Each structure stands twice: as structure tokens, then as C-alpha cells.
Image (tube, helix red, strand yellow):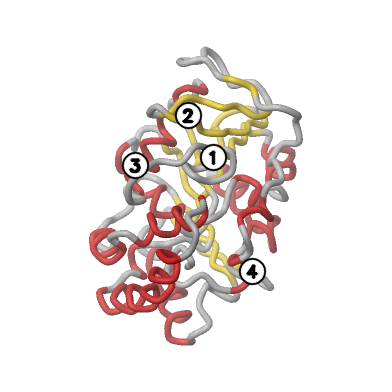
Amino acid sequence: MTDSGVRRGRSSRPLAALTAAVVAVGGVAGCAAGAAGPPAAGPHLVAVNGRKMAFSVAPGRLPAIVLDAGGGMDSSEWRKVVPDLAARTGSEVIAYDRAGEGKSDEASGPWRADNAAADLAAGLTQLGVTGNVILVSHSLAGEIAFSFARSHPKWVTGAVFVDANLPQFFTPSETAKLVALNEKQVEALKKAPSTRQTRQLLAQADGYGPVHAAYHKLTWPSGIPAAVIVSAATPFPAPEDAQLWRQAQQDFAHAAPNRTLGTAEHSSHDVPIDRPDAVVAAVANLLKQ
């Protein structure tokens, strides 16, 4: 299952293949509640809503750049981005594992972007980061960025959507098609052994239709600048779905003068892995604003 529908191609590889740390520092440091000053370099396990979540920090100046991976992915998705992004911008770079991914504990119940955004806000607060952030969101994480920006608008300086789920894509007809495409996979997952991966996929599929019908109606805060990167391939092999995906990216980018659109040439949907330079360039250009 992809973040938008049926997971295909390289993104279908097992989660176990993505265990490399974003910052190569041994061990995981604890983090006290309400940490004062900037967070220390390296990995942190922080308490979030009764669970532990894993964050990794490359220190630097503000705004802090927060990297949020696609569905079924963890912070290692950004392993090629973090070093160059930190070097080029001099900014603090924070990557993290959402609940149930990487080294973070699982959360019970259906997956909801509002809950994921609340987790992110709580984790950043524990690290001492309570504003002046740029969200860099791949695929499914686009939905989290929308929720985060709507619930914490004063925290967000800007956003980079990396081949991300945007509301314009989830028309009633497309959402119905995705629900139908997911049905066979969901039934197979229910019969499969229960693992972290299968539980996360089932949580994302729970209520998919109504959730994305509501998401389709959301708008991005007009005062927050955004950059959009669309992959060359898109997540969809079917031409009509791929075209709708590209059109949604264009429509969002062209809806306000403080948004830009670029294509990551020679890239699959896994833009952070295929074209980390495109992500770094988009963030650097946004910072110039």
C-alpha cells in the first residue's frame, strides 16, 4: 500500500531494510521533559503521550528543518539528505520516526494525521523546539504537515512538500478508486501474521475513504510559503492517476504567490533517496525567502 493507494515498486521493500540511522552516532540518548536551549546533537528518545519516540538532531541555527518520511518509512529515508542539508544551510536538522516506525513505539488505533502532528509537536517541545520550523514532508507526511500547520501556524516558517499527498489529489472519484484498490491488500494483511509493518498498514487503511474525503477540503495557510517537488515517475503506473497526481501538485503550487513548483528529474516516488540534491536545493531556496 502506498501512502496514497497501493504501494508499488521500490517503496514496497521491507521496513527492515531501512534501519540505518540518519545521524551515525552510537546509542540513543534520553531527553528530559522541557529541555532548555537547543537540543544536543545525535539521537534522542523522548516521551510522547506515554510512548517513546526517536528523534535525531544535527545542530545548527534556526529555523529548524524537520524531516518527515513517507508511509512505511522511518528517518533513514533522509540519510542522503541530512549531511548535505546541514552543510549547505547551516540550519538545525531534525529527523524522526513516527509512531510504529523505526525506533519509535507503536500507537494503538487507526492512523490519523492529527494524532501524528500532535506527536510531532510534543516531541519537538520535549527537545526545546517550539517554533520557527520548516517542515519537509514526503508522501504521506504531507497530510501531517497540513495538520501541524493548521494546529500550530505560528510554529511553521515554511514547508517543502516532497512528492507529497496534497488535498487536491483526493477527489471523490480518486479516493473511491484507491479504497477499492486497497481492499484486496487489506484482506490479505488481516490474514497475515501480525507485525509492526502489517499493523501500521492496517492502521493507515482504517477509515481511508472518509479521512481523505475530509482532507480533500483542507486548505494550506496562505501566509506560510511552500515549495513543491514532484517526482518524474509519480507513485502511480496508471497514466490517468499519474496525471491527476501531477495536476494536484501544480494546482496546489499555483494557488498562492508564495509557493513554487519543481520536478525531481530521473526520480521515482522515493525522491529523498533518488534525488537528495533536489530536496536540499528546495529547502535552501525556501530559506532565501
User: Given contact means CB atoms under 8 Å apart, are the residues at marks 4 and 1 in contact?
Assistant: no
| Measured Cα–Cα span from mark 2 to mark 3 | 14 Å
Residue drawn 49% across the image and 30% down it: 52
Q: Is residue 39 left or right of residue 208?
A: right
| Measured Cα–Cα span from mark 4 to mark 1 | 24 Å
| Image coords of residue 50 (percent x, y) | 40, 27
- Mark 1 or mark 3, earlier in chain: 1
Amino acid type at circle 4 is: Arg
Amino acid type at circle 1 is: Val
- Mark 2 or mark 3, earlier in chain: 3
| Measured Cα–Cα span from mark 1 to mark 3 | 17 Å
| Measured Cα–Cα span from mark 2 to mark 1 | 9 Å
Residue drawn 34% across the image and 67% down it: 168
Residue drawn 47% across the image and 60% down it: 164
Under circle 1, the secondary element is: strand
| Measured Cα–Cα span from mark 4 to mark 3 | 27 Å
Q: List the residue tagged with mark 3.
A: 115
Amino acid type at circle 2 is: Leu
Q: Is residue 288 left or right of residue 139?
A: right
* Above or below, comparing residue 182 to residue 136 in the picture: below
Under circle 2, the secondary element is: helix
Say which of 197 and 269 sits in front: 197
Q: List the residue tagged with mark 2.
A: 124
- Mark 4 or mark 1, earlier in chain: 4
User: Given contact means CB atoms under 8 Å apart, are the residues at marks 2 and 3 in contact?
Assistant: no
Amino acid type at circle 3 is: Asn
Q: List the residue tagged with mark 1.
A: 66
Q: List the residue tagged with mark 4.
A: 10
